[in-house]
Image (cartoon, rainbow, N blue to C red):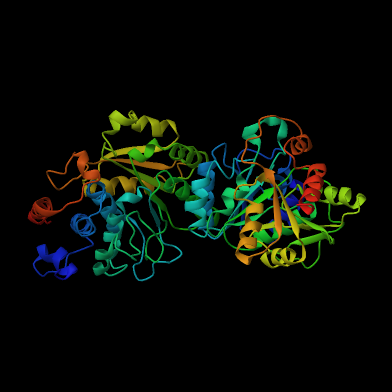
Amino acid sequence: MENYVALVHRAFGGETPDVKNPKVLAWLIRRNGLEMAHLSRGSHIGSVLSVAEIIAVLYTRILRVDPKNPAWPDRDRLILSKGHAGSAVYAALAETGFFPVEQLKTHYANGSILSGHVSHKGVPGVEVSTGSLGHGLGIGVGMALGARMDQAPWRTYVVLGDGECDEGSVWESALQAAQYGLDRLTAIVDYNHMQSLTTVEKTLRLEPFEEKWRDFGWDVQSVDGHDTDALETAMKKAQAAEGSGKPQMILAHTVKGKGVSFMENNILWHYRTPQGEEYEAALKELEAHRP
Amino acid sequence: MRDAFVKILLEEMARNSRIVLLTGDLGFGVLRPVWDRFPAQILNAGIAEQGMVSMAAGLAATGRTVLVYSIGNFPSLRPLEQIRNDCAYHEADVKIVCVGGGFVYGSLGMSHHATEDLSIMRALPGVRCFAPGDPAEAELVTREAIRTPGTCYLRLGRGSEPRVHQAVPAGWKAPESLTLRKGTDVAILSTGGILTQAVDAAERLAAKGISAEVVSFPCLKPLDGAKVRELLGRFRGIVTLEENTVVGGFGSAVCEIAAEAGSGCRIRRIGLEDAFSTVVGSQQYLRKVYGMDGEAVAEKAEALMHE
């Protein structure tokens, strides 16, 4: 295999990608996500493609984190509760300097620390290991509560999947966050309307989803989850809600498989691994649309 | 044991403001002194144990020692995966506290009988398990649980157990066992609040001229393996006693040591025989029904000597 970094960055023609630009970082998340799923014969590329802008905006515009000091006590905390999209966070961390991009090629491999579902052990910048759904919001509630007790300056962010909201524990945590008035906790749902076997609508209907969260005591915004400006505006509005006593929810409407035409809204790509002609076709599409 | 737990908790909270207790909407009277004295260090998480345990892990990540308080199976089996993934895997400083282990809530029925918790919690990697035998042991292990970092399980009994130890044993260090009675014919090894029945059995045996040693193991994991090996060497027969299934619990832990040591000692595990409790009654009534009261323990110990 040619040099991994050279391969995933080749669309930039030798220039260093501007990873502070959310559109560039979102593209790099997709490009690395495709390569990682291809090399590992791994699953969940559809979820990685749908969550790309959410993660990219967080790491470029919102999170106060320091790649040179990942354990900085005042850093913002991000929990990827939909742990199966872990390669999106790994890619964002590597591309922004938390660890070498080259290491991404070990995803899923024997002996690797980059597990299929996101893991914190030995990975700088990852706060929490997830994978079983319905855990992340509760951990985020505890962190936000602890930060408030300490009057600490940092905020807590949790990214959930829509299918994940089938889990009862999500709603336990939703009640608890509202009860404690955690207005420095922001949750973002990657609302791609698809889950493992079929659509959300045909599984356990979540609509009216906005109203559900509102009724649970949260402030809710709905945005286009692929519009980096809209995401940034919504996340900053959530920050400004401090003092409202309400936890902040952003329902980010996304498209599963976004960015590769034949993967978009196709349930097959929750599990299917990109190989052969499909990998080549996906790569061609991504590279043709490099920002 | 509940009162011993609260007594030590208050002492520890007074010296460490980073101790927080979350309750799953239980402990109405028991936790009152905590609400009164340390209102900023106690929080009702509601009847939502999964959320409560995840929250505990998150709070622990902010540098706190977090106790999660509930009864029976509610703080253990209900949020088991949250304990495994969020607490144990993250080495979170979370103490899962169960009040009412075994048949304490005997009249309330199967749902309230915590009879597999010791086996299940013992299996979780890195999770220490404590089951004190009386209020004195409860004081020791509560302090130990709070002061030693990491995830642990503390299985307490009820509100008003008799004291078995005359005083709180001095100089105790985890995971030491505590010998209550020396003997020469048979040994009764016990964990948790059923210790009273081990002592009762030894007295019944003594009346028949049989000398029984009684050893309490307030730490189920790690277990005082040195003591177990010593007893295996000294006795031809050992009885283990727990208000818990015999599958995978204390008796199993003793047998694991015996098997690996190649011991020829005969071991009889007393506990629930892979069964649910299907009748209700007082704790002592259920111990009798399921063959783990003092009388039954004495009979089984004596029978073991003649095998």
Q: How many marks?
A: 0
Give percent across and percent down for residue A194: 26, 37
Q: Residue at x 10, y 62 (%)?
A: A11
The reply to whether residue B22 is visible in this rendering is no
Give percent across and percent down for residue A156: 42, 52
Q: Quadrant of residue A244?
A: top left
Image position of B56 (left or right of A107): right
- The C terminus of chain A: image quadrant: bottom left
Give percent across and percent down for residue B230: 73, 67
Q: Nearer the viewer, residue A28 or A57?
A: A28
- The N terminus of chain A: image quadrant: bottom left
Q: Residue at x 25, y 53 (%)?
A: A42
- Vertical position of residue A214 compared to residue B41: above or below: above
The reply to whether residue A1 is visible in this rendering is yes
Image position of A19 (left or right of B266): left
| Outermost residue toward the front in this view | B307
- Vertical position of residue B279 compared to residue A148: above or below: above
Q: Quadrant of residue A276?
A: bottom left
Give percent across and percent down for residue A221: 32, 38
Q: Residue at x 32, y 48 (%)?
A: A235
Q: Residue at x 79, y 42 (%)?
A: B296
- Vertical position of residue A252 compared to residue B180: above or below: above
